[in-house]
Image (cartoon, rainbow, N blue to C red):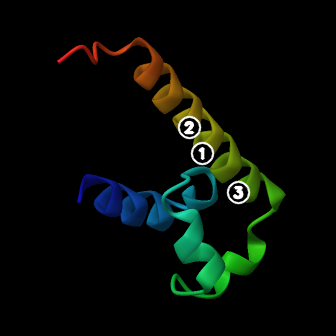
Amino acid sequence: MLTLVLAQVVSVLGWGDWFPWAVPVLISGMAGPSAARMGPHGYLVVILVGLAGGAATALWWRSADQAR
């Protein structure tokens, strides 16, 4: 819920294309015509956050105590 609220607030402030959880709404056009101004950096931010999340998950799986 927090990410949804933050995505709305950040989009209203005009920084939605830099907030990865707001980019899908901007791309779909649900946020209005301002999504047309979104540049390639919005896609790049989503890809980088996805890769970082995948790497962090793999690291956690590798180092977590799974002896139980």
Residue at 28 percent of width and 12 percent of height: 65
Q: Secondary structure at mark 1?
A: helix
Between discs 3 and 1, the one toward the N terminus: 3
- Which residue is nearer to you in this view: 68 or 39? 68
Amino acid found under the numbered disc labelled 1:
Gly
Position of residue 35 relative to residue 40, above or below, is below
* Cβ atoms at labels 2 and 1 below 8 Å apart: yes
- Real-space Cα separation, disc 3 to disc 1, in angstroms: 12 Å
Between discs 2 and 3, the one toward the N terminus: 3
Horizontal arrangement in the rendering, residue 68 relative to residue 6 (left or right): left
List the residue tagged with mark 3.
42
Position of residue 60 relative to residue 18, above or below, is above
Q: In the rendering, at what x and y percent does residue 6 appear?
A: 35, 55
Q: Residues within 10 Å of mark 3 (few under 14, many from 20)?
A: some
* Cβ atoms at labels 2 and 3 below 8 Å apart: no
List the residue tagged with mark 2.
54
Residue at 23 percent of width and 60 percent of height: 1
List the residue tagged with mark 1.
50
- Which residue is nearer to you in this view: 38 or 67? 67
Give the image quarter of residue 37.
bottom right
Give the image quarter of residue 4.
bottom left
Amino acid found under the numbered disc labelled 3:
Gly
Farthest right residue?
40
Q: Nearer the viewer, mark 2 or mark 1?
A: 2
* Cβ atoms at labels 3 and 1 below 8 Å apart: no
Q: Secondary structure at mark 2?
A: helix
- Which residue is nearer to you in this view: 7 or 60? 60
Per the rendering, the mark at residue 68 is none
